[in-house]
Each structure stands twice: as C-alpha cells, then as structure tokens.
Amino acid sequence: MNTPLSWIKAYVPDLDVTAQEYTDAMTLSGSKVEGYEKLDADLDKIIVGKILKIEKHPDADKLIVCQVQITKDGETVQIVTGAPNVKEGDIIPVVLDGGRVAGGHDGEKTPGGIKIKKGKLRGVESCGMMCSIEELGSTKEMYPDAPENGIYIFSDNKEYDGIEIGSSAIEALGLKDVTIEYEITSNRVDCFSVIGLAREAAATFRKKFIPPVVTVKENDEQAKDYISVVVEDKDLCPRYIARVVKNINIGPSPLWMQRRLAASGIRPINNIVDITNYVMEEYAQPMHAYDLDLIEGKKIIVRRAKDNEEFQTLDGVERKLDSSILVICDDEKPIGIAGIMGGENSKITEDAKTLLFEAACFDGTNIRLSSKKIGLRTDASGKFEKGLDPNNAMEAINRACQLIVELGAGEVVGGCVDIYDNVRQPKRIPFEPDQINKLLGTDIDKDTQLGYLKSVDLEFDEETQEIVVPTWRQDLECSADIAEEVARFYGYDKIPTTLPCGEATTGKLSFKLRIENIARSVAEQFGFNEGMTYSFESPKVYDKLLISKDDKLRQNVVISNPLGEDYSIMRTIPLNGMLTSLSTNYNRRNKDVRLYEIGNIYLPKILPVTELPEERTELTLGMYGEGDFFSLKGVIEEILEKIGMKKITLYDPKAGKPFLHPGRQANIIYDNVVIGYMGEVHPEVLDNYDIGEKAYIAVLDMPELVSRASFDTKYTGIAKYPAVSRDISMVMKKEILVGEVEEIIRKNGGNLLESYKLFDIYEGAQIKEGYKSVAYSISFRAKDRTLEDKDVNAVMAKILNGLQKLEIELRQ
Amino acid sequence: MKEKLQSIMEEALAQINGAENLEQLNDIKVAFLGKKGELTSVLKSMKDVAPEDRPVVGQLVNDARAAIEEKLEEKKNALGKKAREEQIKRETIDVTLPAKKPMVGHRHPNTIALDEVERIFIGMGYEVVEGPEVEYDYYNFEALNIPANHPAKDEQDTFYVNSNILLRTQTSPVQVRVMEQGHLPIRMIAPGRVFRSDEVDATHSPSFHQIEGLVIDKNITFSDLKGTLAEFAKQLFGENTKVKFRPHHFPFTEPSAEVDVTCFKCGGDGCRFCKGSGWIEILGCGMVHPKVLEMSGIDPKVYSGFAFGMGLERIALLKYEIDDMRLLYENDTRFLKQF
C-alpha cells in the first residue's frame, strides 16, 4: 500500500514529522514502512514563471527565445527552448540556474537529478529551463492535465487561476510530498486504508485523529423507488448497499484529488472513477458503479452463478463461471462478478445518466477462491478477500456520495437499499492488565495500558471489565491480542530483556544427529565435500538409472502441484542428486571430485499415499578422479569403525543394482544385514549423466547404522607376548572371492588368530588359465604366554584343512 | 723390534691422517689392526723374542695399538662430522615449493551455519529435534492456528501430495509434535528442510532450510524471548550486535515480532549490504498463541512460551556474502571448498 504522507496528515493535523521519523516510529508500532519516496527528491529551484515574450532564435529554426517572468515583482530571465507548445502569456514551471530536475522529457529519470546551469544555446544565453511533467519526475498518466507533448502549462487549467508568479511550482503540482510504502500484515485489513493508517499514526505519535466528517446532501427521492435488491446467498454476501446518483456529470476530478491518487500510484480517469478509487484508498471499501439504465427490471439479485454460465467482464474477456462463484445480476442476467469485476454489459459510458453505486461485503474466502478459479485478481478482490468489515461499507458509500455532491458530479437520491441481516457487533475481551504484564514481562500500570488501547479506539467497559473491540479490528480475539496492542504502543524496545528461568533442561543432539556428525567428519577427512540436493526430482530419473519398470523404487510420493515434472516426485533413491552434482563438476572440469550428502528418501507405506511415507536418512558418497572402488571401501569401513561398528563388514557382489557396473558392485553387510551398497557407476548411467570418467558411489542407510552404532569402546590390553606369523600362498579358481578365504581363516583361526593380511594377488604367467595366486600373512598371539610352534601348527593345520575344501591348492 | 714397531706406528698414523672417508679409514684399520694386519703380525712374531724382553715388547705393541686406535677414533669422528655436514648441505630444499595437501573435504555452508546455531542453543539448554518433511496438513497448518481457507495457506505456496498431506512449508509442525507429547518444560530447536513452490532464482529455492525454536514453561515472558534472541544474535554475529524487535503478525504467535540485527558489515551505520538502513532482518518470533497451546493439550492459563523461526540459507548467505542461492544446491567443489 502506497499513500502520500499529506493524506495521513489531513486526518492527523498535528502530525509534524519527517518522513524518516514517520518511517521509524510507524515500523516500531507495527505498521511496517518498507520505504518512502520524496516526490521532490531530485527537484530544486523550480518556480512558477510566466512567458512574457517569445522571439525566434536567430540561428536555429526549432528554437525560440523566451523572456520569462520569475518573481511577482516582475524580474525576468531569458530562456531558450525547443518546446513546441508554449505561447506568450503561458504560466509554466521553470527551473532556475543552479536548480535540478528529475530527468529528461522522454521520461528517463536520472538518479540524483540533472543540474541545470546557465548556458548558451546556439549562441544565445539561456538562464534556466521550462519543464515538462516528465522532467518533474512524473508522467502524463498520473497528470492527465499535462499536454500531450511539451511544457506543462498551469494557465491551461482553471484551477490554477491566480497562481502566484515566483511561488514554488513543486508545491503547486503536489510534488512537495512523500509517498510512504507500507507492508501491512494480512490480519490488519483496516490498515489497508488511509483512515486506518491515520488512526495508527495518531496513536503512534500521541496526536489527535480527526477522520472526515461524512454528511450527504440528498434529494427528496428515495433510492428504493429506483432499485430493489435481493440477496439470495447471504452466506457469501453479508451486506449489500445500493445508492443511486442521477444527473451525473462526468468530467475530470479536481486537482487535489488527482494529485492524491497520483501520489498513491493511481491514475486519475474521471470524477466518478476517481471517487470510487479515492474512497477505496481512504476506507479500503471497494465500490462498483453500474449504469442504472442498463439494469433490467431495476432489480439487483446477488446469487451463485450457474454452472457453465458465461459472462464477459469489463476487460472484455469471456469467462466461464460455476456455482461456487457469486455474481451480481439484474432481472435477466449477470452484470458483475461479485467483488472481482463488473460486466461489460453494465459499465459506465459517457452517455450514462443515472448511476447505481454498490458497496457490499462479500465472504473473503469465497472471493479468494473465485478469483483464483477464474484467474482474475483485481484491486477490489484483493481487498475483499481479506474479509472486510460490513459496518465500514455504509460510511464508505456515504463518503463517496458526499464527494459526488462536493465535486458536482451528480445528484444523490435520498436513502439507500441496505440488505444487512446479521449486524456485526463489537467483540468483547476481558481486560486482564496483570496477565498482560505477566505475558510481556513488564510492569505497565492499568491506566497506561488503557490509554494505549483507547488511542486505537479500543474502549474499556468499566462495568464488565471488558475491552470493546470495534468491528474493523477483526484481528483481536483474545487477551494475548490485547497484550500485543499494549506492547506495541508501549514500545517493543522498552520491554526488558531477560533469560527464561525455571526448571533447567539439558541441551543435546539426538543420538542420530551425533552419528551423522561423525559420518560427516570422517567423509570430510577423506576428501569428501558436503553437497545438498533437492528431495524432489523427475520420474525420468528411474530410466536414467536403468531401474526396471516394475522395481519397487518406482513407487513414490507424487506432488500434486509440482513446479514441473522435474520436481514432481519425492526421491526414493538418493543417487540422482549425487550423479547430477558429479556431472556438474565434471562438465566444469573440476578434477578429483568427492562429494557426500546426508539427506532423506521417502518411501510410501501405502499407495495411493494416505499416510506419511517412511523417511529414511541416507549417507551418499560419490567420487571420480583419484581413488577407486577400494579407496571408497576404506572410507566406509572407517566411518563404521568411528561409530563403533567394529565387527567384520562383508561385501556381497550379488547386489543386483542396475545402475552399478555388474562386476563392480557390492551390498555392504554388517551383522547379516544389508546396511548399504557401493560400486562403480554403470557405464551407461555415466553416459546418461554425461560423466566422462569412472565414478564410484556408496549409499549407507543411516537408520541401520544408527541402530548398530555405539560409543561403548572398551580398552583391550596391549599384547605382552610376541606374535608368530605364518605366510601362506595359494592357487585357486578365479571365481573364489578372497572374502571366502578370509572367512575360512576366521572360522578356523580360533582364539589365537590375531590378524591376517593379503599381501599378494596375482594372475597371469606361471599361473594356469582361470586361476589366481593369493598370499596371506597370518598372525597369531596368545595373551598369556609365548606361543610355541606346536600351538601355531595346530591352528594352521585347521585353516589349511578348511581351505582345501574350497579346492584351494597350497603353493610351496 | 722397537724400531719396527715405531715405523709401523708412524706409517699407520700417517695413513690415518691421509684418509679421506670412513671406508678408507676402515681399510687402514684392517691393514694394521686386523687379523692379518701388520701390528697383529708383530704380535705373532713374539715367539721369536727373547722371553725376558717379551713384557717390554708386549708393552710396546699395546702402546702402539692404543695410539693407532685412538687416532682412528679421532679421525672417525672428524670424518663422520664432515660427512654429516656434507649430507646436510646436499639435502637443502626449496621451502617455497608448493605444499602437498592431503585431500580433505569441506562442510556445506548451510551445515556450518546450522552447527553454529545448534551450538548456541544447546548451550542454553535446548534439545535438537527432527520431524517429518512430508507432513499432515493438520500439523503444518491447522494446529498452528491456520485453519482451512486461511489466506496464510495461500501465501506459503504449498506443495501438496493430497488434500491431507503436504511437503511442510515450515519447521513449526515439529513444535506441535513435541508439545503433543506433553513433556514440559520444553526447550527445543527443530532444524530441517522445508518446501515452498517458488521458482528457482538467485534468492528463491523451492527447497530450503529453517530452524524453529520453542520454549514452553511456566512464567515465560516476551522479555525472555527478547533476551534469548539478543544473546543468540550476539553469539552468532558478534558481541556488539544489537537487535530490534518490530511488531509483526504470525497466526501461531501473539504478540509477534520480526527481529532485525545491526548490520554486521557496517555495524549499523548503513551500507550497501543493509540497503542503508543499518539493520538486517533475520527472524520472526512471538509468544505462542494460546490457541496453539490449547490445541496441543497445554493449558495456556498455566504455561506460556515463545517460538522463533529463521531461514538457514538466509543466515549462510548473509554470513558468507553469497549472492546467489543456487550455488548452495549446485555442489560445485570450487564453491564448497571455500568453507
């Protein structure tokens, strides 16, 4: 909402503050000022001048030389201009030598303005400039009294008769003003109006608020003789007021009104439209004017539209309606969509003689939904959808009629037709000053509290000890609301700052978050940078990842109103984000990239989704460049070890992941449970993501990790007795996994087995086709003695025996 | 005999003096003192010496041996020292050659900011709580005093799964879930992902993070809220940071406020960063609305509380002067490695 400060001051006459003071104080009392624009910020030394004499320029056909009177005492200056529209006797705005204008006559504004200096134009001295409305920083749209082309001429407008030569042109044009831009919160419908803001300003600055006094001069006729109103759907239209204006006289509105509208960012059109807009700004009550002669049966019916009923709105667009949308009809047809836009069929034309003025109150939610449905949001619907106060409508329509008479725009017919069954009554809220202090942490005495409340017309009923809330304050419902009223006028800044006391609580991270933090640290130690990717993605992701059509991963949570297909499903697998990020890096030529992400996947429990999906946090690691499958495996084992998962981790190559290289993938198994998977990305998937080198990924399912993690580390003594180590070298079929060999070593090693280490693996010359040579160093140790050969020999025999069952041949 | 010994000794000492390295010195030692060395052969020829002279000759041989050994040791030390000096000289490096850095990863700026915020609030006794990202309409809206058809529902541009289930638009539903459990008092923060249907651009993302805070106890006041957030701002942005509370409106708090902190670039004087105002808006807060307490089964006559919420990305962007939010979700390592 944009409003000139002068309009506020009109109703708070004692308000004497700068724009900055106003901004600061209003923001602190709850009417947030986003910013302000001084209309004359870039204007300086611009006065009202009069052209006394015009001569041709001796050396330029398109220039003229003017003698311009610039003081009432008759002082003149010479100004050379190329403007086509001036003549002797014209009274015009003149910027004097050393002054500033806002921009060029093409409407292009220059930040800081343009300085005007005395100079010569084609050899002839020019001491200033006559100004167009654009040079004064405005537009012809906002100043329709400005000529199509050239200098603004005061003397073309009767309202400027008697204007003093030498006086400020800035003031005369209504530019000595500040437009204040507010950001009003949605609960304060009343503050979307000048009246509401002026009330707040008066309370903020502790000044008197003097609203306009509304009285209407009416003729002897009765509106009800001109029009009848039937409201069929009262749930959607709590109040409908109709007034009639006859003998209308359409013309421009007076300059004071035009300037106020212009400063509010509203284009002046003609007196009738301007009055409607003016009252909408002033009272936040939208109104609509119909040509009464075009209303069939002289009857207004407010009803729900019929399904598929068609209607052409004022903007010429044909719109299809349905029964959820409220329409204003005459005896035969719709003539307007309630609260949104009037119809082409009843609009005011220059021939209109009699007007029907409508000020109604519609159900806010319905207007909002209807406006959405037909795809048309107007200034009026924007107001109605906030839910207006029906009691405000009468004051507003009377104000409009008052202005009609004052502006000579027509003759107001007596009375009105007012359909208003359930009159809204003021709410009452118990006044609990102690509770208010208790909530705020303040010590404000009762009378002071009441004083703040009274300043915004919240009266106190001594008898019932209640606050009476005017109907325009729909936001106030309970004692906490009253506390806020007290607080904002007391000043949030004056409320003390304390820390909560009471029962102590222990601050902590959950076990899950602690585990996640350790996983992060380990990943980072190994060069993985933390990434973040979106939780929603495209269903095409499954194809990119070569996931089969009937795979359970394709059962996902679908967003019904996504930003687009690319963001339409909740991910069931965390790889797309990772691969996309690796691809981004690859295509930006970043080398040796390692990324990790901790984020959720969303697995529906039931389809269609009727309960919340299972959200599982996954740790995803991805890398290309330096490192391979086994370096990634090292990182995983380090993570597991650091979170206390110190048992043996197994790797099952039959992971069956379509997006991974079939010969280079594994399920990660701990305690006989698959806790994740890892592998080299399938070459076809790499192609799909446009990654030009081998990449590796691993996914660890955090819930499985968290349930097995532990910070329970126990010290085991450092061995006192020496270890004995034996090396074995074996030849075995290629298909046998070293994991199987290790399992045999573990199973047969007994208590004495301390560790084993693969130290050689070889295929090729000297080894027969289809076989490989594998060598282990196995270490034994006893806690309580030095081992003897016979102890070790016995264990080794068991191990070798086990290995032979796998058709493993020992080498000498 | 005596002369012979004398000449052997002189020869040995001369050779030792002339030795240039430890190998030569060792050769000399072997040549004179070894099993087949010259001095040893003299000893062997002792049997030819008259028995009465033997003690004298023996003494002479031992003296000669001791003298040679002493000289050898002396020379060995000298040569060793020289060799060490030469080695050290040889091993001089150009210390300005580039460092060999281990590959170490970096944490996401969002997480760094979150870690900071968590640290501060944990220190004040808050528990960090998580909640579902796909959430019931009830928790995201209704239980927070935003009933069906409330305009705030539109303002937040919600992604829906169906009429009942949505992607949470705020982390506030976690508050409700914690309040419902009824374990009082409550001091918690709830960080997490939230979603709103904003198109991606430099300042918007359809997915971002919020941190919600909630305190419920007896006698909690607006002044406690002010004190808590002032302390938070000081810890996060520096000891000299001031806070400004402006009245605002949120459906789930009353009274409500928006909070500005003094611009940490200019300290409040006004600069390009804070658009000249000296203040930067960082969060919204208020006293928990009695209706919200009631809906979660807490008696507003006995308990009161405050809640606050802030955008994590906003804090990260401000703290690190990142000018484009999209960078946070691209995961370009050249960006991530800066934090």
Image (cartoon, coloured by chain):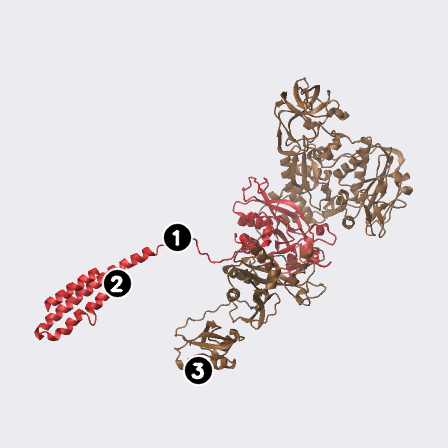
Say whether mark 1 and mark 3 are on the same chain.
Answer: no
Q: Which residue is mark 3?
A: A794
Q: Is residue A388 left or right of residue B95?
A: right
SS for tag 2? helix
Residue A52 disc label: none
Residue B95 disc label: 1
- Residue A800 in percent (x, y) is at 47, 80
Comparing labels 3 and 1, the label whose residue is closer to the camera = 1
Chain ID at mark 2: B
Chain A drawn colour:
brown
Q: Is residue B37 above or below residue B88?
A: below
Say whether mark 2 and mark 1 are on the same chain.
Answer: yes
SS for tag 3? helix
Ranked by sequence position, the earlier of labels 1 and 2 is: 2
Q: Is residue B274 above or below residue B219?
A: above
- Residue A430 in percent (x, y) is at 71, 48
Chain ID at mark 3: A
Q: Which residue is mark 2?
A: B22
Q: Is residue A732 above or below residue A197?
A: below
